[in-house]
Image (spheres, coloured by chain):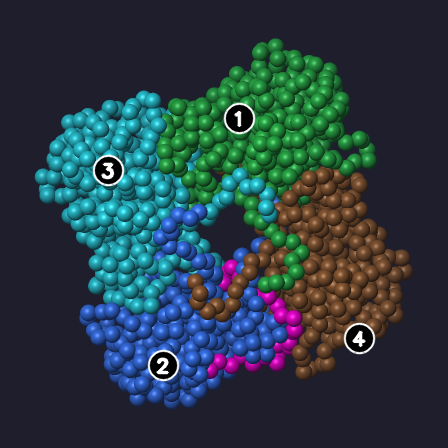
Chain colours: A cyan, B green, C brown, D blue
Amino acid sequence: MSLPKFKELERAYGFDEVAIVPGDVTANPDQTNIEMKIRDITFAIPIVAAAMDAVVDTDFAIAFSKAGGLPILNCDGIQVRYENPEETLAEIIQAPDSEVTALMQKIYSEPIKENLVAKRIKKIKKTGAICAISLVPANTKKLAPLAEEAGADIIVVQSTVTTARHISKSYRGLSFTDLCHQLHVPVIVGNAVTYSSALELMRTGIDGLLVGIGPGAACTTREVLGVGVPQVTATIDCAAARDVYFKESGRYVSVITDGGIRIGSDMCKAFAAGADGVVFGSILTRAAEAPGKGYHWGMSQPSATLPRGTRIRTTVNSTLERILFGPSSRTDGTENYVGALRNSMGVCGALTMREFQKSKLVIAPSIKTEGKYFQALQHSY
Amino acid sequence: MSLPKFKELERAYGFDEVAIVPGDVTANPDQTNIEMKIRDITFAIPIVAAAMDAVVDTDFAIAFSKAGGLPILNCDGIQVRYENPEETLAEIIQAPDSEVTALMQKIYSEPIKENLVAKRIKKIKKTGAICAISLVPANTKKLAPLAEEAGADIIVVQSTVTTARHISKSYRGLSFTDLCHQLHVPVIVGNAVTYSSALELMRTGIDGLLVGIGPGAACTTREVLGVGVPQVTATIDCAAARDVYFKESGRYVSVITDGGIRIGSDMCKAFAAGADGVVFGSILTRAAEAPGKGYHWGMSQPSATLPRGTRIRTTVNSTLERILFGPSSRTDGTENYVGALRNSMGVCGALTMREFQKSKLVIAPSIKTEGKYFQALQHSY
Amino acid sequence: MSLPKFKELERAYGFDEVAIVPGDVTANPDQTNIEMKIRDITFAIPIVAAAMDAVVDTDFAIAFSKAGGLPILNCDGIQVRYENPEETLAEIIQAPDSEVTALMQKIYSEPIKENLVAKRIKKIKKTGAICAISLVPANTKKLAPLAEEAGADIIVVQSTVTTARHISKSYRGLSFTDLCHQLHVPVIVGNAVTYSSALELMRTGIDGLLVGIGPGAACTTREVLGVGVPQVTATIDCAAARDVYFKESGRYVSVITDGGIRIGSDMCKAFAAGADGVVFGSILTRAAEAPGKGYHWGMSQPSATLPRGTRIRTTVNSTLERILFGPSSRTDGTENYVGALRNSMGVCGALTMREFQKSKLVIAPSIKTEGKYFQALQHSY
Amino acid sequence: MSLPKFKELERAYGFDEVAIVPGDVTANPDQTNIEMKIRDITFAIPIVAAAMDAVVDTDFAIAFSKAGGLPILNCDGIQVRYENPEETLAEIIQAPDSEVTALMQKIYSEPIKENLVAKRIKKIKKTGAICAISLVPANTKKLAPLAEEAGADIIVVQSTVTTARHISKSYRGLSFTDLCHQLHVPVIVGNAVTYSSALELMRTGIDGLLVGIGPGAACTTREVLGVGVPQVTATIDCAAARDVYFKESGRYVSVITDGGIRIGSDMCKAFAAGADGVVFGSILTRAAEAPGKGYHWGMSQPSATLPRGTRIRTTVNSTLERILFGPSSRTDGTENYVGALRNSMGVCGALTMREFQKSKLVIAPSIKTEGKYFQALQHSY
């Protein structure tokens, strides 16, 4: 057909649609190095705990940092709006389904207290843990210097979609170039999903990029706005930006896949697609240590007029230790994610994350239709 | 393979198969302009209320026009066949499932009364609302001048598939060229789904084109006839025709995606595919103001020999105001469609509809498999 | 990748994966001509009743021929193995699910009686109906001349897969070239699904080709043998062979899509893919006149060692007249197939079957996801 | 788009996504030759019984060898860790679902007894059966010579992913080149899924290759590690390596598709994709003779820290004889696999396995949607 085309569409892929191809060489899992770096800070495991109120509070941040990962405390939520966040969390957890969105719309309209930002950071730093905190763009100019002064090691600036250029009449747009010059600590920005927007953000001087729009279990951005790119393609495209930017600048900006990871295979595919780190949200709400106590909700939910997240029920059935390192008696990829990562690297013959990023992926829709179909057949024998 | 091919098949896409890619720039939602124009008539919101008996009656038309949208009164249905349409609607609503199609076949065989066409139009116009009415092609030559004289602002000519050329022995085919010359008000024609048929129709002088064959919730044309093109591809192709025709003529014919829109994301994708407006049918039957009172049915259903629509149950659970503008405590994209549109434009950095039409789309099957799968997993933890 | 490839795979399409694109011209349904020809025999409607014991007995054949279609009496089944087939049919119908395959394996091992072949044909011919009968290849040399002498108008030779060349040690392969020379009546052969096998068969002198391997509702050839090509691609490829053969020989061999047609849209897509006729199997078991009385089974089922068909339950809920011509109060495409065909041709602007065969098809997976999804949503509002 | 790409993705296919295209010639099933060869050992049927504790014990091995196939005794499992394996099997079978993984982790931590390896082999050999045993790579250097001396006819070295090169610090990697020189009996190695890794393994001197990572019913490697290639593509790619290697060396290495085969069609597709043999696992647990007694579990399950298999329930509803050779009254492809293979070859006109490997495959998603959809419709008539 040579008809005029209004636009062309390319295919994008999510976790369920791809599989990792094993290598021509294999390696023992215990020889793999899985460190993640954010500028000059090294983390023993490449896992980030999501800046969500049901996932990270100060105690969880401390425990997660000790485990080797990077926890982010949400400084736009309950922790910095309420002196006693436990009470507020309990209210949300106890609300019936029909009232919870309205209740959260009210709870999240309470103003942020600057003193609480400093207080939470100091509590975490006192233990020697790494402290990363997240801010929304509109509050960043005011709160980022304050957080740095209170001891934060990393500042995360996060909204549904963040770009290097923003058009607004109500406030002069945040300049990431200015922010990165002003702060001494590393800056992570998110979220982005495209090559061009990632490259533009990297050129402002940031140290990490959160990749993913709408894939999380507690987020309905795709249903409401129609916006999003599946995580495998988003990660591949942002990793391309990282490598292009590294070539042009010599600076390596870590790409962190944020959202949609449920089981070990999802995490492994994110790395094989090019990620340097991954964010765990819903996964961590299964830990006894998580503040959500069996619930989870997205940070876009509290919008007063257009909520885009749901409170979902999770089951507290593990501990942080077992989720990360096992040992596990589960066979479905929901415990010992670090073991899964090392084993997956082993069958790909990858000794470093950089090598693992170069693994081949194939498009192979649906996890194990073969087995599932068989099990379905069993019932009809 | 170099075998002779009887025909080649191209791929077409529907709402569930694509996602909008965010832009390199973002904008505040409150800076977006979402006006729709039909020739020289400007509408504050680019939403059309479907010419269906369960969606628009005179009162609904008045309310919808006040809200800024374009309502179309069906002048081939109950409103113009019965003096007291409320009674007839009640009959349909109360009929048991097994008898409803036969009942409607009978109800819709009652002749159209010309005086009722004028009466309905005058009632709407008396309030200062914009009045658009729809006719089937076979009645257009007779009723269109009458409707214009009664005060109609826009004439819509609509059938399952409408082309500029029609072969018939029973009546001399309707000429849209003649019709557009004869009438002074704008003419909207539908439905079409292809580049070539859209371009031919635009060249007859029409002002708007309804795009979509068979996608509506209450229509079974695809099951019965096998005919149809999914809405994203249909909109992209008709938008191409619009731009080609604009270049050759200087006239801008509005492309209105009609059918298949359920949640905010569908609507946003229609615009990102190139639409200037969208038709809401089933969505509006959820409003307390809708005449369907919890039911909805397609206009192809009453065919006496080959019905192609079903009466479906909807739930009246909102108001016109909340459906269009919120505020909402729902997180599934079924309220505050205008808010969703402005937010979606914001993350794409689009300040006008014309800019939003240029957003990139990717093929990304299934809305959020990722999250849904996770939620399914929860039950088995 | 430039790795050596062991084989390449092309994509094939089924009814659920395509949609018919409407034309740039439309026509009134009542101006369409839907005749089918098998050599010099003209049928008012292009529909064939399947040579299956639950579909066609002598009375059904007579009624179907009067309705304008082509019925095929199965001369490898109960009609020619039992003097009183009604009794045997009743046995199958009354058997419990767990025993029915074993029972049929026994019933179908009864030898064929030559006198019954002649008797059935004469009963049909006495009424002036067109009489077509089907034989399996192994019995054709013996029974075809006998059937012709008894008055059969068309001989159908049918097995799961039939080719012009067959390798066997137990009997000298049937030569279709010889058969076509020997008989005076038209010969239809099936089944085939590829361009090359269709072309080879056409060159032997046959007059019609049955297209389709494994798609029928009562057939499990695809599960058991893994063999089959979806019907849209199979029809397109065999239609290509027909046109190539017509060019080289001046003879037009009718291509008849056999199996997998359930609703009006499937039938219309078969014609739009290039078919001259379609076979109805399961569809007709819903008629009060069908011998299956609410059951249906495939002809591959009775195999003594490897049955490949299932007896399935159908519901007798219509009549032959209403299934073919309506009027209907059903909206799901399961009645008035002839009306659906004429309407579909109308929206494509096709006045003849030959024109309809040239309609454009698009790949558009899943019938109306859009509507169905919406209906699913209704429950959660 | 000419953006830099971090990686490209190719499509891979599984059994449910392809169908075999019938040939231009057909053959009688009884003329087909279905022998499989491993170096100079000929098997009457090309079917391998999986080296899994629920599938093969010594008695099953003897029976399966008599039936003409190749059974593999797992010499990393219960048979060589426990003097009385029946007791241990009973423990696993009787354990409740919630405890079974933990129990197996304990059971499989019992050390392997060298004397039991010899004892099991001798029991099998005493009956004249062919005896193949499987070892994990880490135990191969020690146990392979011992097994050969005890009389094993074939040594299988198997792990999730096996390559010609392995990086380890805990033991000097197993050299398949050395092993093949050292042993006199044929060596089969697995598992692999890619052209390059298959070719490298073949060049070490092995005689057979097991193809498949993660597709088995009792294996969750794809969920946990994300690693795997669907079986049709994996088989096609490894068959390409076999043919390339045969051309360069004159040695024919048999390619055996291992995992994911459930019904007759899956098996036929494996051969049509290029396999010389197939492994049956879950299928055989339905035989009364199988040691699993209604249960089945994967060999990756017992891992102490990261189990990747599940114990699944099967139903004992057949015998080894009927599963392999029928006769069957089942119509779903779950009995008489040998009959299904011969019939499938027949419709492809293939008299030998080598010819059947050259059959054409098409991409045709979903087994018989057509029929299934129809059956679903039945309920709503």
Name the residue at 75% across, 29% down. Answer: B174
| Cα–Cα span, label 1 and label 3 | 39 Å
Q: Chain of mark 1?
A: B
The three-letter code of the residue at mark 1 reads: Ile
Quadrant of the rendered structure where residue C295 is?
A: bottom right
Decide: marks 1, 4 in contact (CB < 8 A)? no
> Residue D21 in magenta?
yes
Residue labelled with disc 4: C178
Q: Chain of mark 3?
A: A
| Cα–Cα span, label 4 and label 3 | 82 Å
Residue D205 circle label: 2
**Left or right, B359 with reference to D268:** left
Q: Chain of mark 4?
A: C
**Is C266 above or below relative to C216?**
above
- Residue D265 visible? The answer is yes
Q: Are marks 2 and 3 on the same chain?
A: no
Decide: marks 1, 3 in contact (CB < 8 A)? no
**Is A28 above or below relative to B75?**
below
The three-letter code of the residue at mark 3 reads: Val
Q: Are marks 1 and 3 on the same chain?
A: no
**Left or right, B164 with reference to B330:** right
Residue labelled with disc 1: B47
The three-letter code of the residue at mark 4 reads: Asp
The three-letter code of the residue at mark 2 reads: Gly
Helix, strand or loop for disc 4: helix
Residue A156 circle label: 3
Q: Chain of mark 2?
A: D
Q: Residues within 10 Å of mark 3 (few under 14, many from 20)?
A: many
Q: Which residues are magenta?
A: D15-37
